[in-house]
Image (cartoon, rainbow, N blue to C red):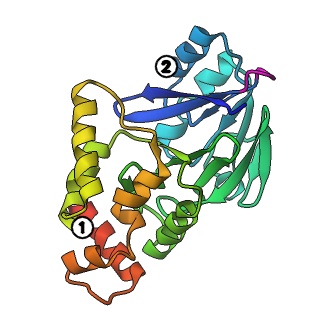
Amino acid sequence: MPLELVTVPCLEDNYAFLVHDADSGETAVIDVPEAGPIKDALAARGWTLSHVLLTHHHWDHVDGLPDLLADHPAKVIGAAADAHRLPPLDLAVAEGDSFTVGSDRFEVLNVSGHTVGHIAFHAPASKLVFTADSLMALGCGRLFEGTPAQMLDSMTKLAALPGDTTVCSGHEYTTTNAKFAATVDPENAALISRTQDIADKRAAGMPTVPSKLQLELDTNPFLRASDPAIARTLDMTGATPLDVFTEVRARRDRF
């Protein structure tokens, strides 16, 4: 059976995620912005934490870890390339590595760009990918450390996953991302429809994360750098996908 997924809102606009295997009882959390909401979610379900998966070193993804581990000792897994900036790891991983949580195998992907050393976790049997601040709902993370070429490579890698994969990203930025996306892809009917759905969900106090990869492929401009329509809107007809991606990211930074 696929892992059970629980979305846990944290801080002002962060998300952590719990996945639970009913047969083994193993439970993993992906990123720990703060401990309280994660402890509450575990207690409400009677789950015992077995794994902590860290995507990158930024404070709003790791600062709750000491408090969480004090009550819930668990195996901490993160990127070998980022180990010098992460909390102490029990298992340091790199792209191509894998490990199990319950019955599912988690595959490690290097998705550098937002940071160098950022990783994502793909659980194919459960059709889940945890992307944090790489691929986001209708966006991608700001390039604090990496280059546009690195982030485009990461987006291309994630875009190759099956379209029915659920994308679990790290922030509730979707409303602003949708407004920006409309400036570079204004005639995209799927984007127009999604923007209204986002507005409806947020008005009802509902999260817009996670999302399906196919929806991101249809609407997220950072996955559509090869789309001639976006190039035309940017007056960049004939430009390379990397040049288009670089321009879209630069415009989003100024938005």
Is residue 90 in view?
no
Q: Residue 71 placed where, x, y %?
A: 67, 15
The structure residue drawn at horizontal position 67% and vertical position 59%, both measured from the top left corner, is 81
Residue 251's label in the rendered image is 1
Q: Going by the image, does 191 lie left or right of 121?
A: left
How far apart are the two marked residues, 1 and 2, measured between alpha carbons? Answer: 34 Å
Q: Residue 200 placed where, x, y %?
A: 23, 33
- Residue that carries the numbered disc 2 in the rendered image: 37
Magenta segment includes 136: no
Q: Which residue ends up furthest to the front in the rendered image?
A: 189
| Label 1 element class | helix
Kind of residue sitting beneath label 1:
Arg
Q: Is the magenta stretch mostly helix, strand or loop?
A: loop
Magenta segment includes 22: yes
Which of 200 and 169 lies nearest the eye of the viewer? 200
Residue 48's label in the rendered image is none
The structure residue drawn at horizontal position 46% and vertical position 59%, both measured from the top left corner, is 114
For the C terminus, give its image quadrant: bottom left
Q: Going by the image, does 9 lie left or right of 166?
A: left
Which of 107 and 67 lies nearest the eye of the viewer? 107
Start and end of the magenta stretch? Answer: 21-25
Label 1 vs 2, first from the N-terminus: 2
The structure residue drawn at horizontal position 39% and vertical position 29%, both measured from the top left corner, is 11
